[in-house]
Amino acid sequence: MTIPEESLDPPSWTELRALGHRMVEDMFDWLDGLRDGPVWQPMPDAVRERFGGPAPELGAGPHAAYADFRELVLPYVTGNAHPRFWGWVCGNGTGLSMLAEMLAAGVNSSVDGFDDAGTQVEMQVIDWCKEMVGFRPEASGLLLSGCSVANFVGLAVARNAVPGIKEHGVPGGLTVYGSTDTHSSVRRAVQLLGLGTEALRVVPTGPGGGVDVAALDAAIAADAAAGLRPVAVVGTAGTVNTGAIDDLTGLADVAARHGVWFHVDGAFGACAALSPRLRPLVAGLERADSLAFDLHKWMYFPYEAGVALVRSDAAHREAFRYAAAYMAPAAGGLAAGRGRQFTEYGPQLSREFRALKIWMGIKEHGVAAFRRLIEQNVDQARYLAGLVEASAELELLAPVPLNVVCLRYRGAVPADRLNALNRALLVRLQESGVAVPSHTELDGRYAIRVAITNHRSRREDFDLLVRTVSALGGELAPPVVTT
Ligand SMILES: Cc1ncc(COP(=O)(O)O)c(C=O)c1O
């Protein structure tokens, strides 16, 4: 008697193969037509309701599942693939990397550090990352979901360098230093590392938006004199609000003088190091003990692609390593340990094959193309800033050192109504489908924030943005009362 057994594979691949071809065609059509569609559109309630209900007991088949994607998902995605998406800090993705994601999911490797190609691909991508930002070849690194987790990893290495922490837990009195503009993920990391959010000493920024290095130096000295234990200085290469860059050389000197770890959050700004023209802006980055940045922001790769680099391979490994018999390298075979055991360098054991899309994308385009695009985005930010400055209705709210432009509609609107007006304006702008910037607040002023990490944007897109913001501002502005 044969016992019936099943798998998740189709009875024949022919039908799924045809559907796969259609999906590829559809996605290329979608990418090809992006510019002509809205950047984003809100999901109607009737569609939202379709997301209720329990998991289906019986399958409806691949065609039905794909039809749901076409109807319920694709029209209502975030929109960051679009040429006029400039919200938060999002990249677009690329065509070949989309296909590479399919290949990675197809082979479905967990990249743990076995004697396999996935490990070699990730090690090469890490080596390329080191080259790109000027880290030495002997530094270590690994790919992670994003810069939040990479910040966590860098600071975990800094914290675990304190003797006895791994065995005995976190003693009180450890402190970390950053600026008022340090990203919230650093605060979260400090808290998750058991230091408590009060341990993050926040120092004001100076006129250029970067941290006041002398004040940070003094804060460390005062804490040390009071018996606390400063463990890390966090510099930012490109703040999320305005793209301001800390004086990283100054911070590296301060950290060295006090014998503390120097971590740099370079989420998007680290990529400026790729350009000889922009590299001076982030000078000092290469002196970091650890650096966190993203390849899904200003390198335009599909989510998720964060990178943590650590100058000392030994410190990095020591922070996360735990010997386990079932993971010990073998004398031969798949577990021969010919590559890096990634699980010894971060919190994950199972790890997706995220390196493939980057490896193939860099091979496809070459580093020079990314360098040109990063410079193009900086030039576009300056172009937009120029348009805003030349406009009678708009106002620039912060300097533009890199690729972030903060602006608002000013017109003849009374100062106390500007925040409400610009808040309403941004909602209208996003709902119009014309463009998606995001928002922030600078010294109490609501800002429309345009972060340009977009390889599809053209100057005409910024012309349209300025025209639309001016027109919407005019519609929303209270009528000028003449007596
Ligand atoms: C300066 C900075 N640091 C950290 C992050 C967090 O990065 P991720 O969203 O990849 O976790 C961001 C995100 O925008 C950022 O701008």
Image (cartoon, rainbow, N blue to C red):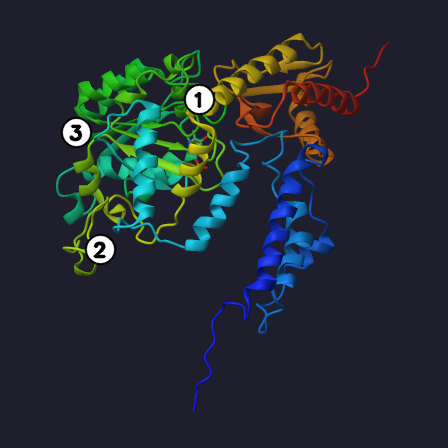
- Give the labeled residue for mark 3: 227
The alpha-carbon separation of the residues under discs 1 and 2 comes to 37 Å
Disc 2 under 8 Å from ligand 1? The reply is: no
Answer with the quarter of the image where residue 290 lies.
top left
Q: Secondary structure at mark 3?
A: loop
| Left or right of residue 186, residue 398 in this image | right
Name which residue lies at 63% across and 68% down.
60
Query: What is the crowding at mark 3: few (fewer than 14 residues within 10 Å), some, or many (at least 20)?
Result: few
Tag of residue 335:
2
Which callout, 3 or 2, points at the residue further toward the start of the chain? 3
Q: Which residue is mark 1?
A: 368
Q: Nearer the viewer, residue 320 or 181?
A: 320
Q: Nearer the viewer, mark 3 or mark 2?
A: 2
Q: Is residue 159 in sight in this rendering?
A: yes
Q: Residue at x 32, y 47 (%)?
A: 117
Q: Is residue 196 visible?
A: no
Residue type at numbered disc 2: Ala
Say what secondary structure mark 2 lies in. Answer: loop
Where residue 110 sits: x, y (%)?
35, 53
Q: Quadrant of residue 84?
A: top right
x%, y% of residue 146? Answer: 41, 39
Quarter of the image where the C terminus is located: top right
- The CA distance from mark 1 to mark 3 is 49 Å
Point out residue 190 in the picture as x, y percentages from the top left corner.
32, 38
Q: Is mark 1 within 8 Å of ligand 1?
A: no
Q: Looking at the picture, does residue 201 appear above or below residue 42?
A: above
The amino acid type found where label 3 is placed reads Gly
Q: Which structural element holds mark 1?
A: helix
Dot 1 surroundings within 10 Å: few (below 14), some, or many (20 or more)? few
